[in-house]
Image: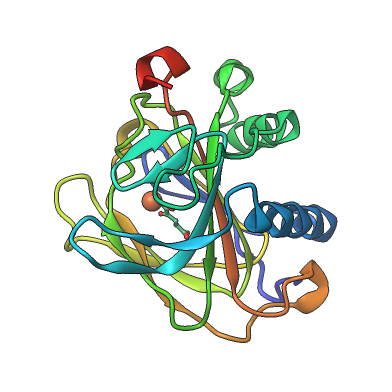
Amino acid sequence: MTALIPRPAMELAPGAVHVPGWLTPRQQRELVAACRAWATGPVPIRHTRLPHGGVMSVQTVCIGWHWQPYKYTRTAGDVNGQRVAEFPRWMVELGRRALLEAYGDESTSTRYTPDTALINFYDGQARLGMHQDKDERSTAPVVSLSIGDTCVFRVGNTETRTKPYTDIELASGDLFVFGGPSRYIYHGVPKVYEGTADPVTGLASGRLNITMRVTGLTDREAGR
Ligand SMILES: O=C(O)CCC(=O)C(=O)O
Ligand SMILES: [Fe+2]
């Protein structure tokens, strides 16, 4: 888990910051344990079905709000109809510390209050195509945490899902934040390097990614 070659924190574009090795091994283990519990219910982890019949290769479970293409609801109508697990206070605090680390701005980070997280699990074959995170009504940053196998993370531009883009590697413990002018960048995961995870995280294989977001929704507006 300790990088032999140090990887410095890097701003890839204004507001898009990669902080390698941000999570401690202990935090990674705790996140794996929490995600493993959420994966079992109240809404079990599943391959999300797309409106035109496709199925995502990534498996996803949500907390706080349930995402299904292309909206957020409290209950998982496309899975088992149950209300998703609460977004825990400790994860709000983790999101704030992540934002402070990435941007160094105390007042932005103390106001940051994520209310949903998409928890993605990738086996060695799973991929995520280029997309924007744009189903949130808020423009607040997205905080992304990676655990387990290293992947290629494609950081694109805000205009098209094609070039120009930059491929970076996200390894276990890495933080990536995209906000400000980079909030609506296209991004994706074209490859997972199977078997690169250190089992000390509790994840024997595969890659776990957690993206915290601010939906900007209230129960009343969402109609439930
Ligand atoms: O797995 C990742 O690093 C990115 C996940 C992502 O882009 C998403 O869930 O919207
Ligand atoms: Fe995304």
Question: Quadrant of the image for the C terminus?
Answer: top left
- Residue at far front of view: 81
Q: Find ligand 1 in the image and state its quadrant.
A: bottom left
Residue at image coords 78%, 68%: 201
Q: Residue 159 placed where, x, y %? A: 15, 46
Whether residue 132 sits left or right of residue 15 in the image: it is left
Whether residue 19 sits left or right of residue 74 in the image: it is right
Q: Nearer the viewer, residue 95 or 155?
A: 95
Q: Nearer the viewer, residue 195 or 46?
A: 46
Residue at image coords 27%, 60%: 130
| Residue 156 falls in image quadrant | bottom left
Whether residue 50 sits left or right of residue 64 in the image: it is left
Residue at image coords 35%, 62%: 188
- Residue at far bottom of view: 195
Whether residue 117 sits left or right of residue 55 in the image: it is right
Q: Residue 49 placed where, x, y %? A: 33, 60
| Residue 94 falls in image quadrant | top right
Q: Is residue 64 above or below residue 49?
A: above
Question: Quadrant of the image for the N terminus?
Answer: bottom right
| Residue 113 falls in image quadrant | top right
